[in-house]
Image: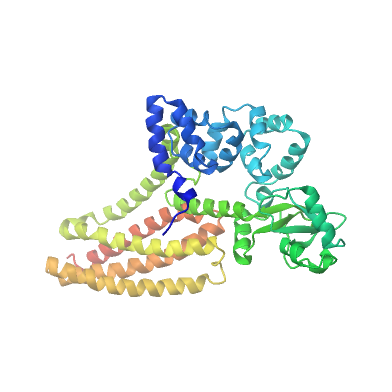
Amino acid sequence: MSTTADEEKTPDIQDSLHLLHEALEAGAETQVQDLIATLHPSQIADVLESLPPNERGMVWELVRPDIEGEVLSECQDKVRAGLLEDMAPREVAAVTQHLDTDDAADILQDLPEPVVDEVLLAMDEQNRQRLASVLTYSEDTAGGLMNTDVVTVRADVILDVVSRYLRLRGAIPEKTDQLMVVDREGKYLGVLPLSEVLIRDPEATVGELMVQDIEGIPASLPAVDVAKLFEQRDLVSAAVVNEAGVLLGRITIDDVVDVIQERADHSLMSLAGLGEEDDMFAPIVVSTRRRAVWLGINLATCFLAAWVIGRFEATIQQLVALAVLMPIVASMGGIAGVQTLTIAIRGIAVGQLGAANAPWLMLKELVVGLFNGLIWAMVVGGIVILWYRDVGLGLIIGLAMVINLLAAAASGALIPLALKRLGVDPAIAGGVILTTVTDVVGFMAFLGLASLFLIR
């Protein structure tokens, strides 16, 4: 596959990091500055996130002032907050004044409220007003994602007037694929695709050509739901309106891609009880404290499983093979449960799983669990019979495996729904609870059946 000249010139982040480390160790400040100058702001953000705090500060000081705002807008929240700590309010105001409103708002939301007030006071009136309107909304809503830089037209004007208006403006906001149509009170009526302005009769009115079936997005709509709308309707941009239907701004596809990326990071990191914005090079004490909470919760569940095993201590002493084999039952149940749990969490996240279709998913997963339980019960039971020359032991471990895989399937489907109903993120707590269930049920089934049928 061929590559363009621009692609060949684009430095790989790992190569850049290697060169940066060498230059920093050699104290070659000019070399570091020259290397940073070859990178796009998003790549500089990646580099900063990949550096330990002391080197991160040194590199940040060498970033050109005119792109500092763009770099900050691309950084993870925790990394950005650390860089902002050492910046004066006037400096923050200067680096955000040329950014899109939503990007500037993201930066200010990482600052303490008193500092935000100082930054706003340091801005000119126009920038202050556009930012204040966005900061009134949570960053995880359509209002927090929107950009207030929007081109609006009225329905009663002709396309020739619209063309002359756009030429007089001299420039239009980036990623503008359509103009927003509003009435005299600023209420959103629909959109006029730019292509219509170019190819239609100049004497045709906006009202004749505008698209009215694309509804405005409520400013309070959660960002996750905004991403779903863009996916379902193949949108590039969309209007944001208040409760009265007045146009407030627009959301563009680049903002939605950021939301999707954050949700993907959230799903991955939550499985380990971490936040998606955790800084890879956060201070040791901070990282230790965050992880200790989930390690403590996991320890409590381990003691519960150990207590169950302890109840069958006499049984294990009489048949040592049980101690060797019982991790197999628990492990197989855990893996099967995670498979169902992952499907359920994804279904909830994309809005495909709820109370209406949960029984169907439960039945389907139970049948899958039963079939897999029978298949692997025969495999494991056969191996155990050959290994220990004990048919009874093979039958017991096979039956225990079927029981645990059924419990894993039921738990994997029910736990996310129950946590969602309680207002707890299933991605964070689901794995810990599921592991506890499969361990306890697996040990209880295997050791309990052994006590009943094998020990005399």
The quadrant holding residue 407 is bottom left
- Quadrant into which the C terminus falls: bottom left
The quadrant holding residue 176 is bottom right
At a point 52% along the width and 70% down the height, the residue shown is 358
Residue 1 vs residue 158: left or right? Answer: left
| Residue situated furthest front in the rendering | 5
At a point 69% along the width and 48% down the height, the residue shown is 147
- Quadrant into which the N terminus falls: bottom left
User: In the rendered image of this protein, does residue 48 appear above or below residue 158?
Assistant: above
Query: So how many labels did they put on this image?
Result: 0
- Colour scheme of the rendered structure: rainbow
Q: Position of residue 194 (x, y in %)?
A: 73, 61
Q: Position of residue 105 (x, y in %)?
A: 66, 41
In front of the other: 228 or 20 = 20
The answer to whether residue 419 is seen in the rendering is yes
Residue 326 vs residue 211: left or right? Answer: left
In front of the other: 338 or 47 = 47
| Residue situated furthest left in the rendering | 389
Q: Position of residue 441 (x, y in %)?
A: 34, 61
